[in-house]
Image: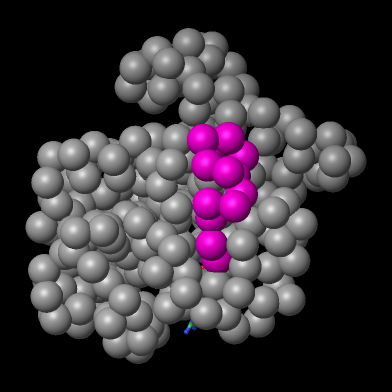
Amino acid sequence: MNTIAILGGGNLGSAIAQGLYKSKQYQAANIFVTRNKIERLAHLKTEGIQVGKDNNFAVQEAQIIIIAVKPYKVKDIIAEIRQDLDPKKHILVSVATGITTSEITQMVGFELPIFRAMPNTAIEIQESITCICSKHANTTQKTQISELFNLLGIAVTINEELMEAATVLGACGIAYVFRFIRAMMQGGIEIGFDAITASTIAEQTVKGAAELLLKGGKHPEEEIDKVTTPKGCTISGLNEMEHRGFSSSLIKGILNSYQKIEK
Ligand SMILES: NC(=O)C1=CN([C@@H]2O[C@H](COP(=O)(O)OP(=O)(O)OC[C@H]3O[C@@H](n4cnc5c(N)ncnc54)[C@H](OP(=O)(O)O)[C@@H]3O)[C@@H](O)[C@H]2O)C=CC1
Ligand SMILES: O=C(O)[C@@H]1CCC=N1
């Protein structure tokens, strides 16, 4: 079994560790997570996951290294571990937004298999969509990393030019969906439900809609047609939402996030 080092056990790094552990394909002892404030990794330590501050030790112990620090810290952490990196042993996976595989290769100073992966926080419960691209990786390594992220949801291999778009649609996207659920709850409370019931109804409705599309493979509008009774309350509500800019505001928000990343 491969050992995985996750350097940067913050929101995403910790979620990856939890997803790996819950997948039961990795034993806790084969997962290392580092950060400075290790007391914040107590929940992982309790499961038997190895936690610490020592990035060099984690890299020496691991075959797969996941860099999960903020983008502006990637250069420093690579400089710290560079002497421990072995192209014959290690695969480097960066989840940092906006740092290309070429930039990472330059930071490392020599060629080694490098992947960029863009998951979202649902990786904690193995329900992420993770977009992946790579440089200097052979077919076996590409399969290995795809299999790893398929354990944690669905992995899709894309061209590197699309990584920023993937960041917006998948990684930021989960926040847009949370905001949609919150708005559903707010509406639900106004028409009579308590917050807990409104949240259960909104969450299960979103889950059901997503499953219908994932399993049925249909276009959303085809499913909408089944719900909209002529002269009924669904089409009346939907049209009011559109008059107020529902689809347009989502599309504009996605473009705004994209422009922010591209800067
Ligand atoms: N959050 C998300 O939904 C997503 C984030 N990303 C990307 O993932 C990366 C991490 O994001 P996120 O988890 O949100 O950020 P966080 O700030 O939550 O996590 C980053 C972690 O890195 C740790 N860290 C800083 N310096 C070091 C070091 N020298 N050695 C080891 N650990 C260190 C910090 O620990 P400490 O606080 O103890 O210093 C912190 O816990 C970013 O590059 C982001 O762009 C990508 C997709 C989704
Ligand atoms: O908001 C951000 O910048 C990061 C990138 C994807 C999710 N969070």
Residue range (magenta) = 21-33
Rendered view: 247 above or below 87: above
Q: Nearer the viewer, residue 228 or 218?
A: 218
Q: Where's residue 5, x and y in %?
A: 45, 62
Q: Is residue 197 visible?
A: yes
Residue appearing at x 42%, y 21% in the figure: 213
- Of the 4 image quadrants, the one containing the N terminus is top left
Given residues 258 and 15, the one toward you in this image is 15
Asked if the magenta segment contains residue 25, the reply would be yes
Residue 27, horizontal then vertical, whole percent: 58, 43
Q: Residue at x 68, y 58 (%)?
A: 44
Residue at 84% across / 44% down in the picture? 195
Quarter of the C terminus within the rendering: bottom left
* Image height of 208 relative to 46, above or below: above
Q: Residue 185 in magenta?
A: no
In percent of width and height, residue 259 lies at 26, 70
Relative to 87, does residue 250 appear above or below in the rendering?
above
Residue in the foreground of this view, choosing between 49 and 231: 49
- Residue 199 percent across, percent down from the top left: 76, 40
Residue 56 lies in quadrant:
bottom left
Q: Is residue 71 left or right of residue 55?
A: left
Answer with left or right where residue 140 lies relative to residue 193. Answer: left
Residue 248 can be seen, yes or no: no
Q: Name above or below for residue 175 compared with residue 144.
A: below
